[in-house]
Amino acid sequence: MFRLCKSKQSQIWFDSIIKNDFLYVKAHVSEFRNYTERRASTQSIVTGFAGVHYAALYGYEDIFRFLLHHESEALTSVQSIVNGYSLAANSSLVQVLVCANQKSLIQHITSSFESDFKMQKLVGVQNALGQNASHIACATNNLIRDWALNPFVCQMECYQLTDDTLSVPMIACLFGRIEFVNDLKRQYYAARTANDQFEMQRIFNILEIKNEDGFSAIDAAEDEMKDCSAQNKKMCKQAVVEVCQQHEKWLDAKAKKKLEALIKQQKLDQELIELKKYEDKMAREAKEKEKQKKLEEKKKIQLQKQKEAEEKEKAEKDKQLQKMQSVSIVAMMNDQKDDAILSQILPEKPMTARLISSQETQLRSGFMSEINDMADQMVE
């Protein structure tokens, strides 16, 4: 009995959302939050939808914004048909918004990325077929600019592959979505004009994605598919090829500049090495010269000291020689004086006087000889 009652109440809950009855939704959200629709799909009912999915489908802004904070992570429980598109199970509210082409509600989410972490978690959600909201946007041609090309979204979702191993650019080229490809092309050239190398590389990487079979966006544009404009597919291919070629030329030019800069740097480094060698050589030579100069100065000082010592020694010897010469002269004078005295004292004994005189002369001669020898030694 309770289940039947609850089931009827849940029907009233979903019907109130379909009827845009915001007051009822606000009053009963705690009872039916994250409930999913169990009724069979009709023109207005979608099996497997939660309340926030209904609000997204019908574009009821007040109810959507209110339920967004209660059921932001709610996923559809079964495959559903939304605006003629077969939406796989486990699809997010953003995927429902894309199918329903609800531009203003998409903008509400994207504008809240920086301030609300819950909104960021809506990016990159993949359903049972591996599709994210950007895959669906390119397949349905809805909200391409508002969601798939948002920088925060594109950074994550454009690199994801579906279960069929298709990327977002591959699907865009497969269906001939020239608007999406041209938007990427404009973003690339804008980044190039601003010299935003990171953005340029990001867009190039997105367009260059290949699956495990080597299938790329260019291959997708060449794939024959019914109900798609061949002209649009051709234009998609041309745009992708143009961006890729331009980026490869830019990479070549960048590599060339890098190589030239490297060669220039190597040349500069070599010049610096040579300069360092020259400076080291000059420093060694200067050090050697300084050392030689000090040695010469030391030698000069030693020679000067030696000269002064020799001069001093010579002066001392000269002085002693003069002294000895003076002594010799005095001795000679004394001898002469003694001879005179002896001649006066012993005149009557000339032989005795001569004998004494001869002895004295011998003694004095020996003494003078010794003095002369000493003088000669001093002179030497």
Image: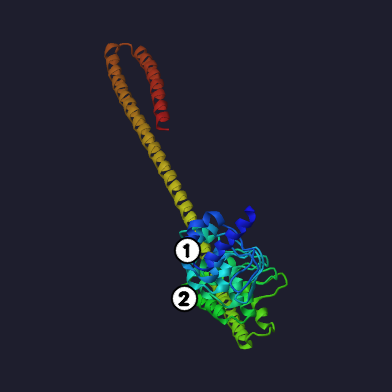
Q: Which of marks 2 and 1 precedes in the sequence?
A: 1
| Quarter holding residue 83 | bottom right
In this picture, is 209 found above or below 341?
below
Q: Residue furthest right?
A: 213
What coloring was used for the rendering? Answer: rainbow
Marks 1 and 2 sit apart, C-alpha to C-alpha, by 48 Å
* Residue 223: % across, % down: 69, 82
Task: Locate residue 25, reporting x and y percent.
Answer: 50, 60
Identify the residue shown where x is 54% and y is 60%.
72
| Quarter of the figure with residue 351 | top left
Q: Residue shown at 52%/78% (left/top)?
A: 183
Q: Residue 44's spot in the image, x, y percent?
A: 58, 72
Kindly state the secondary structure of the residue where label 2 is placed. helix
Residue nearest the viewer, comparing 94 with 306: 94
Q: Is residue 363 left or right of residue 251?
A: left
User: Hey, what amino acid is under mark 1?
Assistant: Phe
Q: Which amino acid, by three-letter code, is at mark 2? A: Thr
Q: Which SS class for mark 1? A: helix
Q: Which quadrant holds the C terminus?
A: top left
Badge 2 is on which residue? 193
Judged from this view, the residue extending furthest toward the front is 1
State whether residue 262 appears in this view: no
* Crowd band around label 1 with a 10 angstrom C-alpha radius: few (<14), some (14–19), many (20+): some
Image-based side of 326 in relation to 263, left or right:
left
Q: Is residue 45 visible?
A: yes
**Residue labelled with disc 1:** 22
Given residues 161 and 287, the one toward you in this image is 161
Residue 315 as seen in the image, left or right of residue 290? left
Up-down: is 346 above or below 143?
A: above
Say above or below: 253 vs 24. Answer: below
- Closest to the camera, between mark 1 and mark 2, is 1
